[in-house]
Amino acid sequence: MKFLFIGENNSKTYLKIEEILDRLGHSILKFEFNQSDMFGQFDELRDQAIASDGIIIDASGLSPLIEFQMGYLLQIDKQIFFSHEAKSSVPASLATSKSKKLFIQEYSDTSELEAHLEAFLKKLESNLDAKLFMIIPPQMNKYLEWVASHTDRSKSDVVRNAVLSVADTDEDYQSFLKRTK
């Protein structure tokens, strides 16, 4: 899986999370905010979040900037793992959040941090598939009904394969994927 990872780059916990993700075979997208072009970078932050499977935020060096990025990222439909040391407090704006996408985990040592992160990753892996409900015209439905009754493929397989083949040839989407590596 691929994760957008935000935090203070040189903190001990940031490096530990990076080590855990690397050891477990996950890719990491790092976002470093350039304060000289703050507003111009929100498109990049959004694109990296969209390209990721989840977001991990190390709050060992929590700053107003990281809080602001989190607020922005909560608007994107991704699960967010937010870790903080037991001796530090969580900002009230986050502690009172009712978002089901936000997982706030407190830890007292790196082994506890690792256990929380691994539990989050397991939960995320089991929830990555998305369900899509759509209204289709009658001619599409006739075809899908025919496929379901006359072949060994399901309606979902046909729609899934059609979307994947379009995604593979969509130049704009392929360009987007290359930019977010």
Image: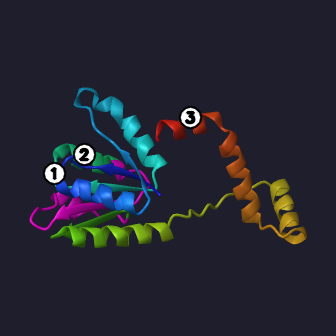
Disc on the earlier residue, 3 or 2: 2
Q: Is residue 49 left or right of residue 89?
A: right
Q: Which mark is residue 68?
A: 2
Q: Is residue 16 above or below residue 75?
A: below
Is 88 one of the magenta-colored residues?
A: yes
Residue shown at 29% from the left, 59% from the top? 17
Residue extending farthest to the front is 23
Residue at horizontal 43 percent and vertical 71 percent from the top: 122
The residue lying toward the viewer, choosing from 168 and 20, is 20
Residue 87 in sight = yes
Give the residue at mark 3. 175
Observer able to see residue 58:
no
- In the rendered image, residue 92, in percent from the top left (x then y), is placed at 16, 59
Gap between marks 1 and 2 measured at Cα: 14 Å
Residues shaded magenta = 73-100
Where does the image place residue 118, in percent across and percent down from the top left? 36, 70
**Left or right for 4, reference 164:** left
**Where is mark 1, residue-wise?**
61
